[in-house]
């Protein structure tokens, strides 16, 4: 069977894909299952991999769901890290554990106890000779992972904290709480997410939920950057385009956007999605914001760059945040790449979500296959058409090479 030249199939929701291809003289075939296409742009589940011809183009790589299924991503990252010359995953990926893996559950309990001990040491108003502080130092002294701090009971509390800060790249993920986020491994758009902070809550979660379906329990970043929009948390949606696997060619979109929570950040309301989950699919259901608040659900990276320069007196977006996001993205793609397969002339548009902490360190939260490319707000209405155009150009304007 030959394909029909310059014929494409896609769903109505990919408005800018349709416009970009039709402007180039392509013809859209209305039936999405039409097999004689030159290009198919669809959700991953709608690609019939065994029927794709070598000359046909599809907007996915086989097994790309390893990126988007949270349990598979965590395992891929840690497997890659274990073989790397220098371990880096803990510098950008909050510690995550897969509940369907008994070894992971054992590690989760150990790291949960570690973070709780760290919380106690950081607590203000608790004297050094308090029983909770003494017990925390004992636990940290016997913690048998890579920290290797030795006997902390013979050192001062401040010295112990200095040592832990020097050795643990996620030291600042713990503030005055011990909050963890529980995510269904195979769901998206904030569905099913829970936050917890006590050992009793963790025990109840593992007993009630973990056996039913794969979950990931991950350390929650307790001190996000809150310098924008009166203390609201946000995440960064960053697009990349994997053009080919051999050779590995990846484009980094220069412009990205920030998605804000509609309610101000606090750790006193862990069951409040409008405080903690910045997914637009969650926040669009929030009650209307008072117009006097001058609040926007999304910002472009151009605006965040300007606002950060006002706060710091230098361009920290380009000099600090973006290079760290690029480094994390490179490691993530390298970790998953061995499991990817090019079928036909496949490619992959990914959306990576980062949260920025108070020290301007980006933390990778998840990776999206088939990220939302709707014109849901004025920000995406501007960025999506430009990014879609770049996906079809041989010489891009809005992208730079990551690999």
Image: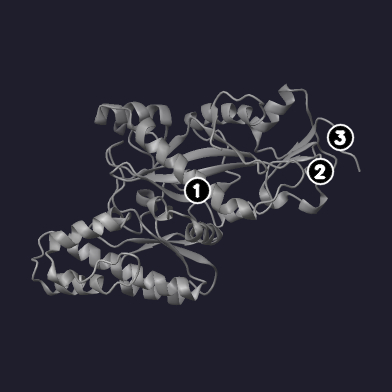
Q: CA distance from mark 2 to mark 1?
A: 29 Å
Which of pointers 3 and 2 indicates the residue nearer the eye? 2
Which of pointers 1 and 3 indicates the residue nearer the eye? 1
The residue that disc 1 covers is 331
Disc 1 is placed on an element classified as helix
Q: Residue at x 37, y 51 (%)?
A: 276
- Give the image location of residue 119, x and y in percent: 23, 63
**Residue 156 versus residue 318 in the image, above or below:** below
Residue situated in front as seen by the camera: 101 or 167? 167
- Give the image location of residue 199, x and y in percent: 32, 73
Q: Residue at x 25, y 56 (%)?
A: 165
The residue that disc 2 covers is 54
The residue that disc 3 covers is 4
Which of pointers 2 and 1 indicates the residue nearer the eye? 1
Q: Residue at x 45, y 43 (%)?
A: 327
Q: Residue furthest right?
A: 1
Disc 2 is placed on an element classified as loop
């Amino acid at each position: 069977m030959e394909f029909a030249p310059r014929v494409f199939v896609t769903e109505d929701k990919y408005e800018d894909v349709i416009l970009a291809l039709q402007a180039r003289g392509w013809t859209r075939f209305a039936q999405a299952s039409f097999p004689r296409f030159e290009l198919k742009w669809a959700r991953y589940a709608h690609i019939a991999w065994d029927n794709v011809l070598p000359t046909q183009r599809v907007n996915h790589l086989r097994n790309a769901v390893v990126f988007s299924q949270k349990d598979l991503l965590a395992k891929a990252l840690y497997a890659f890290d274990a073989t790397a010359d220098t371990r880096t995953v803990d510098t950008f990926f909050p510690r995550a554990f897969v509940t369907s893996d008994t070894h992971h559950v054992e590690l989760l309990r150990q790291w949960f106890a570690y973070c709780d001990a760290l919380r106690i040491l950081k607590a203000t108003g608790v004297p050094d000779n308090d029983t909770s502080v003494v017990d925390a130092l004992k636990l940290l002294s016997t913690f048998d992972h890579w920290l290797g701090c030795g006997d902390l009971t013979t050192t001062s509390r401040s010295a112990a904290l200095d040592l832990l800060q020097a050795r643990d790249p996620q030291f600042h993920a713990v503030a005055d709480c011990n909050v963890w986020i529980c995510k269904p491994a195979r769901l998206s758009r904030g569905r099913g997410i829970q936050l917890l902070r006590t050992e009793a809550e963790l025990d109840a979660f593992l007993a009630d939920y973990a056996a039913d379906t794969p979950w990931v329990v991950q350390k929650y970043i307790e001190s996000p950057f809150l310098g924008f929009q009166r203390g609201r948390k946000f995440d960064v949606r960053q697009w990349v385009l994997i053009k080919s696997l051999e050779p590995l060619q990846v484009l980094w979109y220069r412009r990205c956007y920030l998605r804000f929570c509609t309610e101000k950040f606090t750790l006193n309301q862990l069951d409040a999605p409008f405080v903690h989950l910045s997914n637009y699919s969650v926040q669009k259901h929030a009650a209307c914001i008072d117009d006097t608040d001058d609040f926007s659900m999304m910002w472009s990276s151009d605006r965040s760059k300007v606002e950060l320069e006002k706060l710091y007196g230098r361009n920290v977006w380009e000099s600090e945040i973006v290079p760290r996001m690029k480094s994390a993205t490179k490691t993530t793609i390298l970790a998953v790449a061995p499991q990817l397969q090019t079928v036909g002339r496949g490619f992959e548009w990914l959306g990576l979500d980062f949260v920025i902490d108070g020290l301007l360190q980006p933390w990778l939260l998840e990776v999206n296959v088939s990220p939302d490319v709707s014109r849901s707000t004025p920000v995406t209405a501007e960025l999506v058409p430009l990014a879609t155009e770049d996906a079809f150009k041989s010489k891009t304007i809005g992208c730079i090479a990551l690999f």
